[in-house]
Image: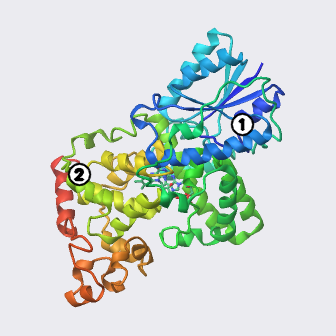
Amino acid sequence: RPLIVWLREDLRIADNPALAAAAATGAPVLPVYVLDDATPGRWRMGGAARWWLHGSLAALGQTLRQLGAPLILRQGPSTECIARLIAETDAAAVYANTNPEPYWLGAESALQRSLAAAGVTVHYFAATTLFSPGSVRSRRGQPLQVFTPFWRACRSTTAPAPLQPAPLHLRPPTSLPASDDLAAWSLRPTSPDWAAGLRAAWQPGEATAQQQLVHFLDQDLATYALSRDRPEPAATSCLSPRLHFGELSPRQVWHATLTRAAVAPALATPAEAFLRQLGWREYFVHTLHHNPQLPDAPLQPKFAAFPWREDAAVLRCWQRGETGYPIVDAGMRQLRATGWMHNRVRMITASFLVKHLLQPWQSGEAWFWDNLVDADLANNAGGWQWVAGCGGDAAPYFRIFNPILQGERFDAGGAYVRRWLPELARLPDRWLHQPWEAPPLALAAAGIRPGIDYPNRLVEHSIARTRAIEAFAQTKIVS
Ligand code: FAD
C-alpha cells in the first residue's frame, strides 16, 4: 500500500524528513500538494506568493518525476483532499512535515483524528525551523519574549538536527490517482500580466535555491555583517522566499554557513551575524506559536485603543510609492516590481505608514502579504508588530525613523533611489533624499517638475513626528 507524502512549505527533496522517512520504508510513495485556500481563511496565499508557488511546484514536479514518483496536485480543503486520496489509493499512512501556522496546526490534528478511525496513521516531522516551535524557553521553562535572550538560548541548546539525505529513487504506486493540471490553477497572472519583474528577478525551485545559497556563501557572506543594511547593491542572501516555501531548509542554510566558517576563520563574525538573522525567523515562529493572534491583534493589548487615522487615499499613495519621500517610494516600487524588498527598507516603509501616516499596521501587513514572494505569516506579522511597537520585542513607538536620515545613511550614493525612481536619477546627491529642498534651478536641470514628475510630500517629517507622539500619548500608552 502506498504512503502519501503531504507537501506544503517544504517543496524540496533534500533534507525533507517526511519524504526521507516514507522513502526509507521501501513502500510506494505518493507525493501530494493540495492548493488549499479554505484552511488559512483570510490568510490564503497572496498574489506574489502564488506566482512563486507555480514555479516551485513545476520544478518539484519535474524532480519527483525523475525520481520515479510524480507529484499529485489537488485543490480544496486539505483534510478532505487527503482523505479522498486515501480512499482512492488505499494508502496506508500519511507522512508530513508540520507547519507552524495556527490554522495548519488545527488541520493537522483534525487529519490525524479523522484518519485514526480508519486505521491510517499520520506521521509528522519537524523541518520548518531549526528548533521546534515552543521548545526554546528560559531556564524556568517560560517562553522568551525578547529576541536577545531567545537567541542566546538557541545558541546554547543542542545544534539543529543533522541533514536528511535526498532520496535517489522513489517507488511509485502501481496506479496513479488523477492529478490537477498546474496551469489550470492559474497561479500566474495573465491579463494584466503584472509578473514581468518577478520573472526577471527570480527562478523558483530547489536547484536554483541551492545555487543561490552557494553564491551567497561564495560572494557575499564575507561582507554580510558590514553591508547587510545597505539596499543597493543588495548583499543579503535573498533566500527568504526559498526558506518560506521550503526549497531550502533552515538546517541546510545553518550547516552550510557553519561549514564555511569552520574552514575560514575570517568568516566567523559575518557567519554569526547571518545566523542571527535566521534567529529572527525562529523567534517570530516561536512568538506565533505562543501567540496565535500575532497576525491579527497587537501583542500589547493597550495598542488596540490606538487612534489610527484610516484613510484609503493615503494608504494608496504609500502602496504605489507616491509619498514624496524617495527612500519610502523606492522601497514600495521595488516591492511591486520584484515581490521583494530589502529588510532595512521594509523597516523604513513600514514605520512611515504606521507613524508618519498613522495607518493601522494591519493595512501594511495585508499589502505586504499580497505583494511579497516571501510573504510569511510569522515573519510578516512579527515584522509589522516590531515596527509598530506593539509586539513582544518591539522598537519603542516613540523611536520614529527619519526617512531622510535613513536614506542618507543607508543609500548614501543614492544608487537604490535612482534605480527605483528613475525620475529622480539626475538630481544631485545632496537633495536626492529630500527633493523639496532642491532649488528650482536644480530641479529644472534634473528635469523634475515637483508634483508632476515626482509627488510632493504627503506630510512634513517634523509635523508627522509630533503628531505620532501625540497620538501615542493620547491613548496613554507612553510609559
Ligand atoms: P538575510 O539577511 O539574508 O537573512 C537570511 C534569512 O533570515 C532570511 O531569508 C529570513 O528567512 C531570515 N530573516 C532575516 N531577517 C529577518 C527578520 N527581520 N525577521 C525574520 N526573519 C528574518 N521576512 C519574510 O521571510 N517574510 C515576510 O513576510 C517578512 N515580512 C516582513 C515585514 C516587515 C514589516 C519587516 C520589517 C520585515 C519582514 N521580514 C519578512 C523580515 C526580513 O525583512 C526578510 O526576511 C529579509 O529582508 C529577507 O531578505 P534576505 O533573505 O536577503 O535576508
Above or below, 2 against 423 in this view is: above
Mark 1 surroundings within 10 Å by alpha-carbon count, few (fewer than 14), some (14 through 19), many (20 or more)? many
Q: Is residue 130 left or right of residue 333?
A: right
> In the rendering, which numbered label is found on residue 478?
2
**Outermost residue toward the front?**
191
Can residue 130 be seen at all in this image of the molecule?
Answer: no
Whole-angstrom CA distance, mark 2 to mark 1, is 47 Å
Where residue 57 sits: x, y (%)? 62, 42
Residue displayed at 45% across by 28% down? 38
Where residue 299 sits: x, y (%)? 36, 40
Where residue 199 sits: x, y (%)? 54, 58
Can residue 409 be seen at all in this image of the molecule?
Answer: yes
Residue displayed at 43% across by 81% down? 413
Q: Nearer the viewer, mark 2 or mark 1?
A: 1
Q: Is residue 446 left or right of residue 2?
A: left
Above or below, 209 against 167 in this view is: below
Above or below, 274 against 421 in this view is: above
Residue displayed at 60% across by 37% down? 132
Q: Quadrant of residue 133?
A: top right
Amino acid bearing label 2 = Val
Secondary structure category for the residue under label 1: helix
> In the rendering, which numbered label is found on residue 17?
1
174 or 445, nearer to the observer = 174
175 or 117, nearer to the observer = 175
